[in-house]
Image (cartoon, rainbow, N blue to C red):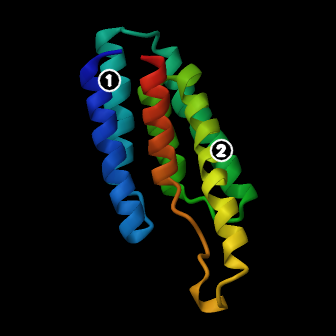
Amino acid sequence: MQMALIVLLVCLLLVCVVTDLRSRKIYDGVTLPGTAAFLVIHLITRDISLLEPLAGAAGLGGIALLVAVVSKGQFGGGDIKLFMMIGAGLGWSVGIWVFMFAFLAAAFIAWPIIVLQKLLPQKRRVKELPMAPFIAFSAMLIMALAY
């Protein structure tokens, strides 16, 4: 995979993490152009079959949409589009690993928080965790292992 593509993906992931931590939002102005840029990059460079990033964008976006429906809104549209962008950048076969590790990483952090919440007063309890940090961590880990 090209270094420029990896650098672009890391930069976009960092923007998504910062905005998700600050405002609990992942903006379409980052994820949608990122998705399009990755598809164009793969089309021009032909580094992988175009089917791979298309399947990644559709597949990861579709699975994330299913998670959003099942979670009744706890998993937002920005998270769905972030996974779509990652699928377009890394392709299906690498992106699905990012998806699985993101939820594993989130669970690894969430379970101790849930246990500790029992000790905190009701007002101080955390209601939700932003997913972008876990998604970005997983994407960077998988990229480091895969490339």
Q: Is residue 142 above or below residue 124?
A: above
Look at label 1 and name its amino acid.
Val
- Tell me what residue is drawn at x 52 percent, y 15 percent: 51
Please tell me how crowded label 1 is: few (under 14), some (14-19), or many (20+) other residues with Cα within 10 Å. Answer: some
Quadrant in the picture for the N terminus = top left
Judging from the image, what secondary structure is the residue with disc 2 in?
helix
> Percent position (x, y) of residue 9?
34, 35
- Tell me what residue is drawn at x 72 percent, y 70 percent: 115
> Percent position (x, y) of residue 45?
30, 11
Which quarter of the figure has residue 24? bottom left
Residue at which label 2 appears: 104
Which quarter of the figure has residue 64? top right
Residue at which label 1 appears: 40
Quadrant in the picture for the C terminus = top left
Q: Is residue 76 above or below residue 134?
A: below
Look at label 2 and name its amino acid.
Leu
- Tell me what residue is drawn at x 31 percent, y 51 percent: 15
Please tell me how crowded label 2 is: few (under 14), some (14-19), or many (20+) other residues with Cα within 10 Å. Answer: some
